[in-house]
Image (cartoon, rainbow, N blue to C red):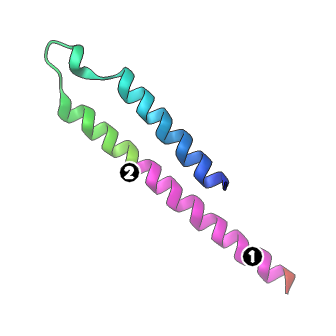
Amino acid sequence: MKKVNITTAVLLIYLIVMSIIGWPGKQADPDYVQYFCVIGATILVIGLLRFLQIKRLKIREKMKDGKKE
């Protein structure tokens, strides 16, 4: 398993745990819109991080292949 997959999985598990802990349903006036917007933004950031990590790995592999030739 690649390091990118492990990092993404750990961050998603962390997000799930924090989402369960921070569930606003116990409050008198829950703000579900803000709750789900924060979760959505976090998923977007995790996706962006994954994209950048994969791009960085591809650039590294190209540089390694260029030095070997």
Task: Check disc 1 and report the residue beneath it.
Answer: 63
Q: In screen coordinates, is 16 left or right of 60?
A: left
Image location of residue 16, percent across then percent down: 42, 33
State whether residue 5 is above or below residue 67: above
Q: Quadrant of the N terminus?
A: bottom right
Q: Residue at the right extreme? A: 68
Q: In screen coordinates, is 4 left or right of 60?
A: left
Figure quadrant of residue 27? top left
Task: Find the distance from the CA under tag 2 to the CA under tag 1.
Answer: 29 Å
Q: Residue at x 38, y 21 (%)?
A: 21
In depth, the one of 17 and 48 nearer the eye is: 17
State whether residue 18 is above or below residue 41: above
Q: Quadrant of the C terminus?
A: bottom right
Looking at numbered disc 1 in the image, what kind of residue is underneath it? Met
Figure quadrant of residue 67? bottom right
State whether residue 46 is above or below residue 14: below
Image location of residue 25, percent across then percent down: 22, 19
Task: Check disc 2 and report the residue beneath it.
Answer: 44
Judging from the image, what secondary structure is the residue with disc 2 in?
A: helix
Main SS of residues in magenta: helix
Count neighbours of disc 1 (C-alpha within 10 A) and say few if under 14, some if 14 to 19, many if 20 or more: few
Mark closer to the chain start, 2 or 1: 2
Q: Magenta part of the protein: which range?
A: 44-67
Q: Residue at x 52, y 56 (%)?
A: 50
Q: In screen coordinates, is 24 left or right of 2?
A: left
State whether residue 9 is above or below residue 66: above
Image location of residue 47, percent across then percent down: 44, 54
Judging from the image, what secondary structure is the residue with disc 1 in?
A: helix
Looking at numbered disc 2 in the image, what kind of residue is underneath it? Leu
Q: Residue at x 86, y 81 (%)?
A: 68
